[in-house]
Image (spheres, rainbow, N blue to C red):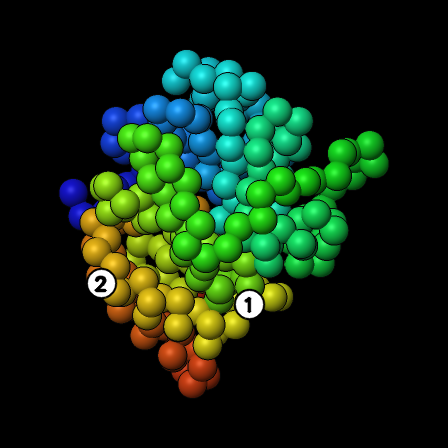
Amino acid sequence: MKNCSLSDNQIIELHPDIFLIKGKDSSSHVYLLRSDYKNVLIDSGVDKNFTNLRQSLLSIGIKIRDIDIVINTHEHFDHIGANRYFQEHALISAHRFAAVKISTQDKYVTLYESGDLNEPALRVHLWLENRFRFDLGNFVLEVIHTPGHTSGSICLYELNRKILFTGDTLFAGGALSYIAESGSVGDYIYSISHLTTRKINAIYPGHGDMSEKPEDDMQKAIMHAKALLNNETGVNVTNFREAS
């Protein structure tokens, strides 16, 4: 397998106790890590996708209150919207640049829109820094700050299996992530260049297919970003709900 096509599979066990829950419509993918100590979600998807997320978790044998930690890869609505269903019992975490935008309800930067006037404010309990580490026993996640798509974007590197959860920083095929309101093409190139120094066996992005060709993907992403800086036409930019 080089690129893992999701097709119609809603849930995929990528490794023992690492599950992909495929995002629907505008929602990002959600990853569940069922570790020795804690149950962790990487991103929560949009709030309107929560019913689907709950059913998917139940089919794995996990209830909503069994989730201990939610780690947001960045501050956009399609990755944080369902946080509200976890924040009363689980620790919500994000890089501090993303956390300040989430906690202050900066809807311009988060792109978050909702017509529910009674919705609870989103909170972030753990404000992460680069190289922060989650020691979960059978999994160890290292936070890598990768600004570019947004200022608060992070990747999560699982040290034992050398896999990288990339959010909207890196996609299969090296498609360039939309450079959002708080982002920077220069930061993006620097971040991807930094990732090339790591041994990475696979990338698990926030949208689209998985990939086991991370070196090719990273080189193509850098090439696309440099082409964007040079105003070249035909740059391969992703076209997800928020163009991220």
The answer to whether one can see residue 174 in this image is yes
Can you tell which quarter of the image residue 194 is in? bottom left
Query: What is the three-letter code of the residue carrying label 2?
Result: Asp
Q: Which residue is mark 2?
A: 216
Taking the image as shown, residue 48 lies to the left or right of residue 206, namely right
48 above or below 224? above
Q: Which type of secondary structure does the marked residue at label 1 adopt?
A: loop
Taking the image as shown, residue 132 lies to the left or right of residue 111, namely left
Can you tell which quarter of the image residue 136 is in? top left
Q: Mark 1 or 2, which is nearer the eye?
A: 1
Q: Residue furthest bottom?
A: 230
Q: Position of residue 26 (x, y in %)?
A: 54, 43
Q: Residue at x 41, y 82 (%)?
A: 232
91 above or below 96? above
Q: Would you call the spot at circle 2 few (<14 residues within 10 Å), some (14-19), or many (20 or more)?
A: some
Q: Residue at x 54, y 20 (%)?
A: 64
Taking the image as shown, residue 129 lies to the left or right of residue 144, namely right
99 above or below 136? below
Q: Which type of secondary structure does the marked residue at label 2 adopt?
A: helix
Q: Residue at x 32, y 70 (%)?
A: 193
Can you tell which quarter of the image residue 7 is in? top left
Q: Position of residue 135 (x, y in %)?
A: 37, 37
Q: Residue at x 32, y 30 (%)?
A: 137
**Mark earlier in primary sequence (1, 2):** 1
Q: Could you tell me which quadrant the N terminus lies in?
A: top left
Q: Which residue is mark 1?
A: 183
> Marks 1/2: CA distance?
23 Å
Query: What is the three-letter code of the residue carrying label 1?
Result: Gly
Q: Nearer the viewer, residue 236 or 221?
A: 221
The answer to whether one can see residue 207 in this image is no
Q: Position of residue 69 (x, y in %)?
A: 51, 32
